[in-house]
Every structure is written in structure tokens, then in C-alpha cells.
């Protein structure tokens, strides 16, 4: 069976990846996890989604690549815009809409990846490659600093990166210092990249809220949670309506994307409007008793 594929950019590898569709069944489970708000579970699930839908494994990607891939999946399989409702201090509700493609374009900065993702430094008897972290979220700064050490190579044993966690404390202090400096410089530049800006007005004062892809806080993860978060009851209502009212099979519903299911809803609404127009027209122009 032929399957539909679409493409996402992978700037760190200077390539693209083909993606499979995120089904409604998988999307619903993801929404449950996001609402449960267990960060470790959510991160594991995002990595699983990439591994299942992408031709490139999550372990080979930076966290910025993951953001691009997951936002691309969200745009294609759910909805291409991010819609937010924000309540200001004066209780006024602001309804905001952001095009996901605009966010992806800001992340897809090849110069940033060239500058920070493969920085090689040679020491006395070994060589270290520093890069952009892979994880979406870190519990502490130490883990973050160590994460930017991508490879460790020695003259005698070759590549020993897989032992990084056990040998990190035995490496010269200058390695940790350079790693910390590398992530500090990267953060300084990535911190200037604003993905979302929300401004509200209360009286004569204005306040703003920004989301940047910072590695020193959980903003990348929060952006993804915000993108996939949805009222779970509305998904069950959608599933019930499609099954009970439109007579769509359970298999079709579960294997379709949310975006596809909304097309069926659109067809139904259009048909209903046409019926209402026809009924109103018939009421205005009834047939005469004599025909």
C-alpha cells in the first residue's frame, strides 16, 4: 500500500527527512500524556514519535532538529496554525494565532548549526567535538554542559564517546570549562531568537511574553506541549460524532490524521448549510395549491 510522506528540514545534518503521518489514535494518546504533564514521559514519547515517523533516529538529532520535525508533524497532521487564548490581568481574553511555518523558518538557521554543532578541539592526547544538545529538557546545568560533548577520541583507543558518562570526571578540567563556554556562547545567540511574542495591554501599561528555544530552561519542551495540548473531551466528542452521526468506521477514524477528520466535519457542515439554504428558499417560494 502506498503511504503519504512529507518532508521536514534537519539543519544539523544539512538534509531533510521523510515523515509518516501521525494518526488520530496516536495523537489522542499524546494529548493524554501532555495533559498528565510528566515531562520525562512526554520527552520519551516525542522521541518515540520521531523514531516511528522519521527516517532519521532521534538519537542523531539536536533538540532544534526535533523541534522542527515535531512542529512539522503538528502542522501537517493536526493544524498549520497555533491558536492560543490568553487572559490578561484585567480578565480580557486575547485570541492569538501563529503560523507554525513561521516558527520553523526561524529555527532553520543553517549558520547557527555550522557555528555551534561540530566544534572540534584538540588537546594533549585526545580530541573533543562540541555541539548542540540533543535533549529537549535538562534537570540541571551539569547535565546540560556534558550533553554538548558530542564525541571523545583518543590516540590509543579511538572513539570512546559511548563511555562518556563514566569517564567525564577523569577528563582534564579544561574540557568541562570549554564545554561550559561552548554552551554559554550558544545560549547567548539562541536566546536572541524569539519564536513567539505575546503582548497584552492593561490600561496604559503593556506586558509581553516571549518563547525562545533556550537550553537553560524548559521553553522548547513547553512550546511543544503548547502545540499538542488540546481539550481531551473534544477529541472523544469528535470520535463519537464521526462514528455515530457520519457512520465512519473505527478503523478509518483511528488511522486518519486529525486534519483529515476535520475535513469530514467540514463536508458535513457545508452540506448542512446547503440544506438550510434550500429549506429557507422553499419556505419563501411555496408551491401554489393549484400547482
Image (spheres, rainbow, N blue to C red):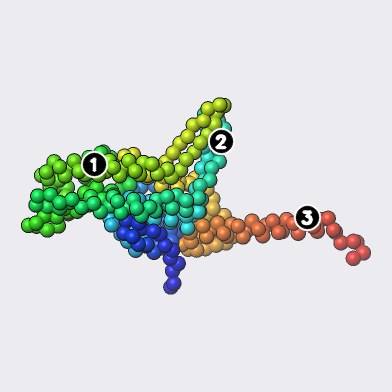
Q: Give how far apart the Cα atoms at labels 3 and 1 are.
A: 71 Å
Numbered marks: total: 3
201 sits left or right of 116 in the view: right
- Observer-nearest residue: 274 or 182? 182
Q: Secondary structure at mark 1?
A: helix
**N-term-proximal mark, 2 vs 3:** 2
Q: Which residue is mark 1?
A: 181
Q: Where residue 177 appears, x then y in whole percent?
A: 18, 41
Q: Which residue is mark 2?
A: 93
Q: Give how far apart the Cα atoms at labels 2 and 1 are.
A: 42 Å
Q: Give how far apart the Cα atoms at labels 2 and 3 are.
A: 36 Å
Outermost residue to the right: 290
Q: Secondary structure at mark 2?
A: strand
Circle 3 residues within 10 Å: few <14, some 14–19, many ≥20? few
Can you see residue 145? no
For the residues carrying marks 3 and 1, which lies nearer the camera in this image? 1
Q: Where residue 258 appears, x then y in whole percent?
A: 50, 56
Outermost residue to the left: 156
- Whether tag 2 and tag 3 are in contact, CB under 8 A, the answer is no
Q: Which residue is mark 3?
A: 280
Quadrant including the C terminus: bottom right
- Observer-nearest residue: 261 or 94? 94
**Which residue is at 45% across, 47% downward?**
227
Q: Give the label on residue 45, or none.
A: none
Q: Secondary structure at mark 3?
A: helix
**Which residue is at 47% across, 34% downward?**
208
Can you see residue 255? yes
**N-term-proximal mark, 2 vs 1:** 2
Amino acid at each position: 500500500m502506498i503511504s503519504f510522506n512529507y518532508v521536514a528540514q534537519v539543519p544539523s545534518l544539512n538534509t531533510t527527512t521523510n515523515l509518516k503521518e501521525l494518526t488520530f489514535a496516536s495523537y489522542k494518546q499524546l494529548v493524554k500524556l501532555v495533559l498528565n504533564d510528566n515531562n520525562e514521559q512526554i520527552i520519551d514519547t516525542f522521541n518515540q514519535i520521531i523514531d516511528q515517523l522519521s527516517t532519521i533516529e532521534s538519537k542523531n538529532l539536536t533538540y532544534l532538529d526535533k523541534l522542527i520535525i515535531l512542529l512539522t508533524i503538528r502542522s501537517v497532521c493536526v493544524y498549520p496554525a497555533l491558536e492560543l487564548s490568553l487572559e490578561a490581568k484585567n480578565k480580557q481574553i486575547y485570541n492569538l494565532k501563529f503560523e507554525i511555518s513561521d516558527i520553523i523558518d526561524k529555527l532553520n538557521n543553517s549558520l547557527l548549526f555550522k557555528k555551534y554543532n561540530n566544534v572540534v578541539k584538540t588537546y594533549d592526547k585526545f580530541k573533543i567535538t562540541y555541539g548542540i544538545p540533543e535533549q529537549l529538557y535538562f534537570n540541571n546545568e551539569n547535565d546540560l554542559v556534558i550533553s554538548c560533548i558530542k564525541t571523545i577520541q583518543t590516540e590509543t583507543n579511538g572513539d570512546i564517546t559511548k563511555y562518556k558518562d563514566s569517564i567525564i570526571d577523569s577528563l582534564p578540567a579544561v574540557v568541562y570549562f570549554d564545554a561550559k563556554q561552548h554552551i554559554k556562547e550558544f545560549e547567548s545567540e539562541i536566546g536572541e531568537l524569539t519564536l513567539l511574542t505575546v503582548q497584552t495591554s492593561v490600561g496604559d501599561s503593556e506586558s509581553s511574553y516571549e518563547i525562545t528555544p533556550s537550553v537553560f530552561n524548559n521553553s522548547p519542551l513547553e512550546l511543544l506541549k503548547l502545540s499538542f495540548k488540546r481539550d481531551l473531551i473534544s477529541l472523544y466528542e469528535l470520535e463519537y460524532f464521526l462514528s455515530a452521526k457520519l457512520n465512519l468506521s473505527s478503523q478509518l477514524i483511528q488511522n486518519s490524521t486529525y486534519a483529515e477528520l476535520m475535513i469530514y466535519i467540514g463536508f458535513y457542515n457545508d452540506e448542512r448549510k446547503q440544506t438550510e439554504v434550500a429549506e429557507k428558499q422553499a419556505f419563501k417560494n411555496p408551491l401554489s395549491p393549484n400547482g
